[in-house]
């Protein structure tokens, strides 16, 4: 559409245009209700239909088994960093895999609640790769093993779910949510902030196996921080983020129309391949991640010259290619290629990078 | 606008039509950014302008002194029920005024963290009035005194801020937020879920005096539950509920254009007077609250006959007057008359009630 930019933001990020158009069209009167979704009582039939259909579509897309709850919560990944230990850390011990800044942050938060063992880390390699997960020293008394499967800042993905030796696996999948199929039954708990691949900031989707939804949380866990509170009430203990759930629901329907997560993986592989292949042959730009650990969603790259990186970011912004600046903790550039970023956007980016390389290489 | 209904929901509730229209118009391209607000990086200049202007307009509307922080958080009032004690209960003691279901719920949550003294309650009168607050037995070691100034379910308002004898006052003002002027300097902490008078569900506004934003919170308080986390980062510790903040910002501008909170009080007094005067003269309907404690925002009423109440709710729905059913814990009817509910909606309601009374009285 006229005036729209190519947005490579790491999140909040691009949403599908058909979803935005439908949301605009329904703004004053959604589905014949005579009101905006933002004006609907969360206890009304109109909103319950939106919530139920969002859950049903998500279950279908991800193949979520019946013994898992789907919760629509608030507070983002950072709230989950506390909720996971508060709800699961019964022995006050957990094992963390640290493969980037987000898993590191999660492990630090968990230390508020008990003993945290870092059983694998690639911090020594500046998180440019996934650590070796082939024979994890899982602690006998660990309540769970935690990982962040796609590190948004460092651009790595854990491709092989490790053997957790019988311990439940808790995973942050925020920045790869819905980008490819996953086997939910391999996890005890999954969570994702919506603002990358599913909807607006302010919705966190939690998928949790029913045996992990328990009464015996840590003492002093607020009612709102207990998974059981939300599982027992179908995410309607209090007023949920209704608008965000509605947008997620529209995105889920868009994904189904496009062929679901297998089709999304194909699209995402094609987009990422275009960029990675260029990075591998460029004389100016290079990727920062070991090949087999590269994320399909977040592609960090550098020229190796900070001044040139800054020039690239400034000129790309002016050319309508937005939010290519790398995270402040890493520098350089980063292109996030979430589901709603079209192939054409990557083509435009490549053309711009080729031109920039000719002029500055 | 064509097809719109009159929506008396207690929340989420009616929003101003000009706000909805602007949000629809800007959905694909907000302010020349080339993207929806939902797609903007929360660290971008475009979004920071939205956040800064929302805060500035709110400060102006409410006359918030400079030594108070304004925070845009997630999780609703129920999350504040825990955050207040986790952050303020240093002596593990607090005094609660219980004037309805929401303050009762807040007091129960606070018991997870320490000693809670109920220093005034109207539960014995079914919350049909505000308890006597004239000489409160404030506990010498109380960390704060808590109240819910407008009880959404029971329809009472505390008109006189009580003397808390030097203790900070923490107040839930969710359902009267922005409906009339308040003297912020009388409070230590104020909070409001946005979904009644300010915007969509998923944003909680907290206004907190800077001496109450402290490091020494209760042990085990998650990072996201500390006011200091959000005060230090200007509500940008993690991704905030950007869309909700944007809508609140548009509502704040709409309020300013209408003359601010003094003008809103006049409008709201007129709307409420129309309904209360009818209830006082009706032979069929009656209000449930002592006159001097009646809320301008939430007006519960009954016929005294449950079958007739149900008939009223069903017929009013069919007539395009929505969400008049009372809360499930109280029964009967309730009309919520928030800022965005027009005078005309109350006139339509009265006409319907008069007709119903003639037919069923």
Image (cartoon, coloured by chain):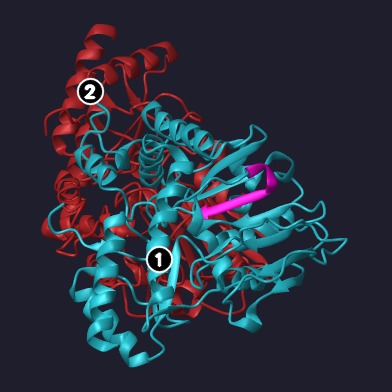
Chain colours: A cyan, B red
Q: Where residue B250 sits in the image (x, y, percent)?
A: 21, 57
Magenta region, residue range: A184-192
Q: Which residue is outermost to the right?
A: A140
Tell me if I can see residue B135 in this picture: no
Relative depth, front residue between A191 and A62: A62
Q: Chain of mark 1?
A: A
Q: Secondary structure at mark 2?
A: loop
Instruction: State left or right for residue A251 relative to residue A152.
Output: left
Q: Which mark is residue B320?
A: 2
| Residue A194 covered by magenta stretch | no
Q: Which residue is outermost to the front?
A: A281
- Above-or-below relation of A62 to A329: above
- Above-or-below relation of B17 to B50: above
Residue drawn at (16%, 47%) of the image: B267
| Residue A191 covered by magenta stretch | yes
Residue drawn at (45%, 46%) of the image: B130
Distance, label 2 to label 1, CA atoms, is: 43 Å
**Quadrant containing the N terminus of chain B in the rendered view:** top left
Which residue carries the number 1 mark? A10
Q: Secondary structure at mark 1?
A: loop
Q: Where residue A232 sits in the image (x, y, percent)?
A: 62, 36
């Amino acid at each position: 559409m006229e005036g729209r930019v190519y947005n490579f933001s790491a999140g909040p990020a691009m949403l599908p245009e058909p979803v935005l158009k439908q949301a605009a069209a329904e703004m004053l009167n959604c589905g014949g209700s005579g009101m905006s979704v933002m004006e609907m009582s969360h206890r009304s039939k109109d909103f319950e239909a939106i919530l139920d259909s969002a859950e049903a579509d998500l279950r279908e897309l991800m193949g979520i088994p019946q013994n898992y709850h789907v919760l629509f919560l608030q507070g983002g990944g950072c709230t989950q960093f506390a909720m996971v230990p508060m709800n699961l850390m019964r022995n006050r011990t957990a094992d963390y895999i640290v493969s980037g800044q987000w898993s590191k942050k999660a492990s630090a938060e968990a230390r508020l609640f008990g003993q945290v063992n870092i059983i694998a880390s690639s911090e020594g390699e500046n998180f440019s790769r996934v650590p070796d997960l082939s024979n994890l020293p899982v602690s006998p008394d660990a309540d769970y093993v935690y990982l962040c499967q796609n590190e948004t800042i460092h651009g790595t993905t854990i491709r092989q779910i490790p053997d957790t030796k019988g311990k439940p696996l808790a995973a942050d999948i925020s920045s790869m949510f819905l980008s490819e199929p996953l086997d939910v039954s391999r996890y005890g708990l999954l969570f994702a902030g919506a603002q990358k691949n599913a909807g607006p900031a302010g919705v966190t989707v939690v998928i949790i196996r029913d045996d992990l939804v328990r009464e015996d949380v840590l003492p002093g866990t607020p009612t709102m921080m207990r998974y059981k509170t939300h599982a027992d009430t179908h995410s309607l203990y209090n007023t949920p983020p209704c608008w965000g759930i509605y947008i997620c629901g529209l995105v889920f329907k868009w994904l189904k129309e496009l062929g679901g997560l297998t089709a999304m993986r194909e699209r995402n592989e094609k987009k990422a391949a275009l960029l990675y292949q260029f990075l591998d042959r460029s004389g100016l730009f290079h990727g920062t991640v070991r090949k087999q650990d590269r994320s399909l969603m977040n592609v960090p790259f550098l020229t190796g010259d900070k001044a040139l990186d800054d020039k690239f970011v400034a000129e790309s912004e002016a050319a309508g290619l937005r939010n290519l600046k790398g995270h402040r903790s890493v520098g350089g550039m980063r292109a996030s290629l979430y589901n709603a970023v079209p192939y054409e956007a990557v083509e435009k980016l490549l053309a711009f990078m080729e031109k920039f390389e000719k002029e500055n290489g």
